């Protein structure tokens, strides 16, 4: 998870029961970079054990999608439409289909 958020975000994620689903939580407060700065995405890209499986999913076309794509991270805009963005999904269920079954999405 990459967010422009406070250092306590990892505790918040755990507190709402998502801690076991998210391998790493990176926040602008800890990395020193806010999205869409390429440095934020570069740090995120270099973190996972399986970098070929990294995706950015967000609702801000500039900060989330276009920012990620600058450093080669595929991205999906969710719950919004924007003509500058290739991958768009109405909701998170659609995102899952796009990532895991792109042929039928």
Image (cartoon, grey):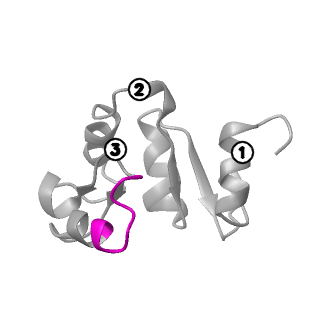
On the image, numbered disc 2 is attached to which residue? Answer: 50
Which mark sits nearer the N-terminus, 3 or 1?
3
Q: Left or right: 83 with respect to 67?
A: right
Please check the rendered image and state whether residue 16 is part of the magenta-colored stretch, yes or no: yes
| Image disc number at residue 98 | 1
Query: From mark 3 to mark 1, how far is it between C-alphas?
Result: 21 Å
Q: Nearer the viewer, mark 2 or mark 3?
A: 2
Identified at 17% across, 70% down, the residue is 8
Which mark sits nearer the N-terminus, 1 or 2?
2
On the image, numbered disc 3 is attached to which residue? Answer: 41
Query: From mark 1 to mark 2, how far is it between C-alphas?
Result: 18 Å
Query: From mark 2 to mark 3, how far is it between C-alphas?
Result: 15 Å
Query: In the image shown, does 88 or 66 lie closer to the viewer?
Result: 88
Q: Quadrant of residue 42?
A: top left
Q: Is residue 57 above or below residue 9?
A: above
Task: From the top left corner, tell me how far across and down residue 4 is, in percent.
Answer: 29, 66
Q: Secondary structure at mark 1?
A: helix
Task: From the top left corner, tell me how far across and down residue 55 is, in percent.
Answer: 51, 42
Q: Which residues are magenta?
A: 13-21
Identified at 32% across, 67% down, the residue is 13
Q: Quadrant of the C terminus?
A: top right
Q: Left or right: 20 with respect to 28?
A: right
Task: From the top left corner, tell me how far across and down residue 35 is, in percent.
Answer: 33, 58
Identified at 36% across, 55% down, the residue is 36
């Amino acid at each position: 998870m990459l967010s422009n958020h406070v250092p306590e975000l990892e505790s918040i994620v755990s507190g709402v029961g998502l801690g076991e689903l998210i391998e790493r939580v990176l926040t602008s407060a800890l990395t020193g970079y806010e999205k869409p700065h390429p440095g934020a995405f570069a740090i995120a890209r270099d973190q996972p054990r399986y970098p070929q499986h990294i995706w950015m999913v967000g609702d801000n076309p500039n900060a989330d999608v276009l920012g990620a794509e600058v450093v080669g991270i595929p991205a999906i805009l969710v719950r919004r439409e924007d003509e500058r963005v290739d991958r768009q999904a109405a909701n998170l269920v659609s995102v899952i289909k796009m990532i895991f079954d792109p042929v039928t999405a």
